[in-house]
Amino acid sequence: MARSLLRPRVARMSDKAHGDGGSIPRVLIVGGGVAAVEVMLALRDLAGERVEVQVCAPRRDFVYRPFAVGEPYGASQILRFDLGRLAERSGASFDLQSISSVEADAWQAITHDGVPIPYDYLILAAGVQLLWPFPGATAFWGVADEAGIEHVLRGLREGELRRVAFALPGGCSWALPLYELALLADAELSKAGVEGAHLVVVTPEEVPLGVFGIQVGTEVGKLLAERGIEVVAGAHPVKFEQGILSIAPGDGVEADAVVSLPRLEGRRIAGIPHDRDGFIGTDEFGRVIGVERAFAIGDITNFPVKQGGIATQQADTAAETIASEVGCDVEAKPFDPILRGVLWTGEEPRYLYGELSGGHGETSSMTVRPPWPDQGGKIVGRYISPFLAEATEIASH
């Protein structure tokens, strides 16, 4: 029987020592999303009582965002978990604090209220800011009020809208929810017996969901064609007005409404170097470039794919590195991304797989059965998937 992930674990120790006189190193995790929860759980498993873990986040709830895409269609409900209770179950402490800056030389983070929080290791998992995609679009925000999406669906059902475009903005690095919105809309129209509606996906990608690889892109393209959903590839949406979605390059796309995903920017933290879009550069072990004993994981990093499963792999790498440095018998392996995704279609889901570091083509696949252990969620993570499966009794909708 598998060991429960809800019980503390004593770390495996090696002969290495931390070298700080015997005190227990404090690991400060900034953020409360998937990456933060995964690294909190990984540290508990790999380092146990060898480290003291503190989580600081501006919100008390952990929101399981991938289920949000089904809410406008009545296909799912967003799950929310109390971060304080999750932290308690994993042996960590939780503080409802927002971090505004880091004083790396003094080994402390500063809250918006000016309160210093000391650390020995810093893990930045603060996520991204969601920005309006382009003029005229109806944005799908994921966890906010989805009245705009529901208005578009109602217009399709009632025949007020005949042509709807689903457009991916430039710079958005996780396109899968947009394809789900289009496929679920098509399924909804079929269920309601609505005929004559036309759905089109407009994307800068060369092939649909090509980030997984050529094989997946080809299969997703076939699926969309079978469902009668047009694809305009290699096109960046510019603005939507007077029934025309302007794209570059190419002629405009006629539409009665345009649904899009938000643009993303990193959350800037003073004292931490970042690029012009706010994203943090890291090495292959997740260390922030130029800042000692600081790590960044998840969407806040400059890794181009912003996806929950990728965030958990970054988190595991950072946790292994810290556990190794504090004297645990753990081998830190460099980040070697594997992309796994569940595509909701309104019918049978598709399971997508791609090895990002090994190239595209033969390393990707789309199947009707998951080629990995299925925990019932949409994010595949070593620790967070089984943990949340066991912790469903403390979830709220």
Image (tube, rainbow, N blue to C red):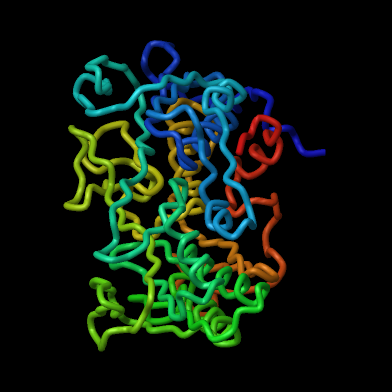
Which residue is at the front of the view, 44 or 153? 153
- On the rendered structure, is 300 left or right of 156? left
Residue 47, placed above or below residue 320: above
Name which residue lies at 51% across and 48% down: 65
Q: Position of residue 324 (x, y in %)?
A: 47, 33
Q: Position of residue 61 (x, y in %)?
A: 50, 31
Name which residue lies at 26% across and 79% down: 247
Which residue is at the front of the view, 63 or 378? 63
Which residue is at the front of the view, 260 or 380? 260
If the image is split into quadrants, where does the N terminus sit? top right
In the displayed orientation, state which residue is furthest to the right. 1
Residue 386, placed above or below residue 160: above
If the image is split into quadrants, where does the C terminus sit? top right
Q: Position of residue 50 (x, y in %)?
A: 52, 20
How many labels, in total? 0
Which residue is at the front of the view, 247 or 291? 247
Name which residue lies at 50% across and 79% down: 217
Q: Position of residue 203 (x, y in %)?
A: 37, 76
Residue 242 figure quarter: bottom left
Residue 394, placed above or below residue 95: below
Residue 31, placed above or below residue 144: above
